[in-house]
Image (cartoon, helix red, strand yellow):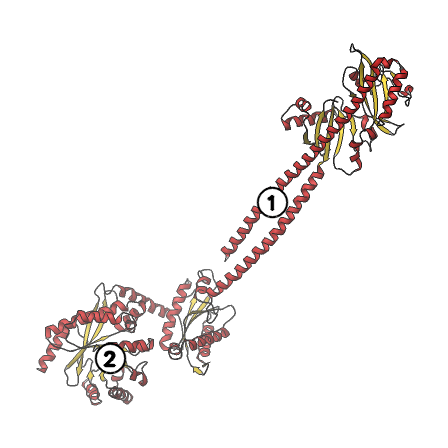
Amino acid sequence: MATIKKNIWTLFYMIFFIGIIILSIVIFFLSLDIQKKYKYEQENITKISANSVNSVFLQYEMILNILGNELTLNNNYKSKKNSQEILDNLNKLNPSIIGFFLYKPNGEAYLTNSTVDISKLRNLLKSEETKEVFKYTLNSDKMIIGRTFFIEQFNDFIIPIRKTIRDKENKVIAVMSAGIDLKSGFDFFLKNQNSGSIHETFLFRDFDYYFQIAQHIHSKNKEIYNHSIPKEIIDNSLQRVSLLYNTSIKDIKENALITTIKSNDKRNVLASNIYIKDYNIWLVTQTPLKNMYNEIYTKSATLIALFFIVFSLIYYLFRYINNYEKTKQELLYYQATHDDLTHLHNRLYLTKEFSSLDKQKPFSLFFIDMDNFKSINDNYGHINGDLVLKEVSKRLLLLINKKDILVRYSGDEFILISSTINKQDLENLASGIIEKLSMPFYIKQYEFRLGASIGISLFPNDGDTFDEIKRYADIALYEAKKDKNTYQIFEKSIKEKYLKKSLIERELKTALEKNEIYMMYQPQINKDGTLYGVEALVRWENKNLGFVPPDIFIPIAENSGMMRDLGLFIIDKSLDEIEKLQKNLDFKFQLSINISVKQFMEKDFYENLFNSINIHKSIKTDITLEVTENVFIEDLEFIVGLLNRLKKHNIKISLDDFGTGYSSLSLLKRLPIDELKIDKSFVDDILTDKDSLSMVENIISIGKKQNMTVLAEGVESIEQKDLLQISGCDLFQGYYYSKPLKIIDLESYINKSINIKS
């Protein structure tokens, strides 16, 4: 779950990071586009304004040319009357011109139109403001624009224009001058002044940097035309333009290139420039950068807001997916770590929760196993069995603390992890569990009475790891199961017993390979004293353990999965040795072979048995398979079906240790049993204990009524033999006749028996 959560948020952060990059790129190109737009728009305004200004000045230059032609025609300039008439006529035709003037080459006013008082005109060569421009005009053939100035009489700004008149010898005759009313003559240029336009356009002269027209400024500051732009500002701007456009200032002027730069001073404007070379003036259009930046910021802010709105939606989508996955993972984890039936924790949870307990607090582990639960599933079905298990889990939950962990380990097994570690408290808790689980279970119309066996171990007293603690609790449970409905706390003696069992199990794994397993045979005698047959008994002698009784190593073989190989060895070895013995003696007798419960439950037991029988076809005897009563606990229908198949092949079935275990009379009727064996524990006391004798007589009576042969084990005296025979017993086996014999000793025993009979 942590991995999925991490991956989905990693994906979100990746998308967010990519989104930030894309947003940055979009804002970057948006900024470029806006800057390009402002630059393009401003350069267009600059170009249009330059063309308009150039056209206007060209128009006024043509007027001066017309005036010059008129004055020089027939030497009209020599006649003040004719000249003034010409000036007045032109003035009437051009209302934007406040007056026309003629100046002598020495700078004195010679003639004006009739509306102007000539006495008020100053000498242009003597005035500091006009001296340089007048000289420049005298040396130029083009129209020269003078400095803009304010006239109180007209309450407006005037732009003077001047041009020389020359005779045929190119000698200066006079200087024509006209005053252009800035407001009416350049109304197209000034009309944006109050229109709210963000652009500001102005003209200044190239040679002295005085303003000719300052669109927005002059209305606020009439002194603007009395000051020139600082030379360092102009030089710095021209140098930056030259570097930016990689061209010289001369080329920019000659080709009338429009250039645009950002100011690097306090003006903080975007300025577009063009040089009008015919009149030696620069036209500049500028826009405050804040307008451009505001648009960039506004649109960027809109994009950023939209970005975060979109990513907020994406975030909530991812959070929904994450929460959905989290809920799904929690559900899957719950399903993986909980039992479907009881909703308790399961084995997987136990493994994960206690994978390492080296640093955990002390605890106790209760291994709880229900007694006789299998009979409910077998006789009443798994549905009722499941309902019982649900009730078991509810009862257990009522007995434990909230901090304790209860696990359905498997089937009818439960594990309780408890913080209880005091011995008396452990015993009280275990007794309480047994008492609670021993109470009747009312399921539908049925009443079930069970019980529970409990094995208890302690951490860290009994082991350093969880697996050890669980294993020792299981061992203690095994001990408790011997008496049932009780509990056993793991002790050192149990551990020693377990270790010995483990040693036996290890040695048993190689016992067949080392030829440590062998067979012995105990004779079974008819009432007349003749040999009926022999029971094959497996024996094991180990160099480390010495002689190990079969009642010890057979259960270990069954529980460790070694019974299959051991069982096949017993069958093959017994058939092989008896086959050879019968060939040597030419004598037929019965062979009884003990079959383990585990062997019977193997799917291929039937095939393996007859494979061995077919290998030893020459054996001249009947075969009896001895089974104990607990074989019928496993799967009754399967066992009965298997026994019936064996009976069809003349295999006899003997029920060993009858009366000590599971069998009942009703069950006995269903089983295809040929022989009942009376357990030695009943035979031992028949001479001194009336109850034991009565039990034996009842077993013999049951066998006779079921048409079964009855065999008594453990016959050790003639008195026991005689009493059993009087009671109706058919066959006898025990030390009175013979102890178990090796095959070579059995041959001698049979030879002796045959000779005695003869």
Camera-near label (1 vs 2) is 1
268, above or below 363, in the image: above
Q: How crowded is mark 2: few (under 14 residues within 10 Å), some or many (20 or more)?
A: many
Nearer to us in this view, 138 or 207: 138
* Number of numbered markers: 2
Q: What residue type is labelled 1?
A: Leu
Mark 1 closeness class: few <14, some 14–19, many ≥20 residues within 10 Å: some
Instruction: Tell me the quadrant of the picture where the C terminus can be found.
Output: bottom left
Nearer to the camera, 592 or 380: 380
Residue underneath mark 2:
654
Can you give x and y, in whole percent of width and height, for residue 31 in the image? 64, 39
347 to the left or right of 706: right
| Residue 248 image offset from top left, x and y in percent | 65, 23
Is residue 55 visible to us here? yes
Q: What residue type is labelled 2?
A: Ser
109 lies above or below 409: above
Q: In this figure, which residue is indicated by the disc labeled 1? A: 23
Q: Which mark is residue 58?
A: none
Q: Dot 2: what SS?
A: strand
Q: Within the image, what quadrant is residue 519 found in?
A: bottom left
Q: Earlier in the sequence, mark 1 or mark 2?
A: 1
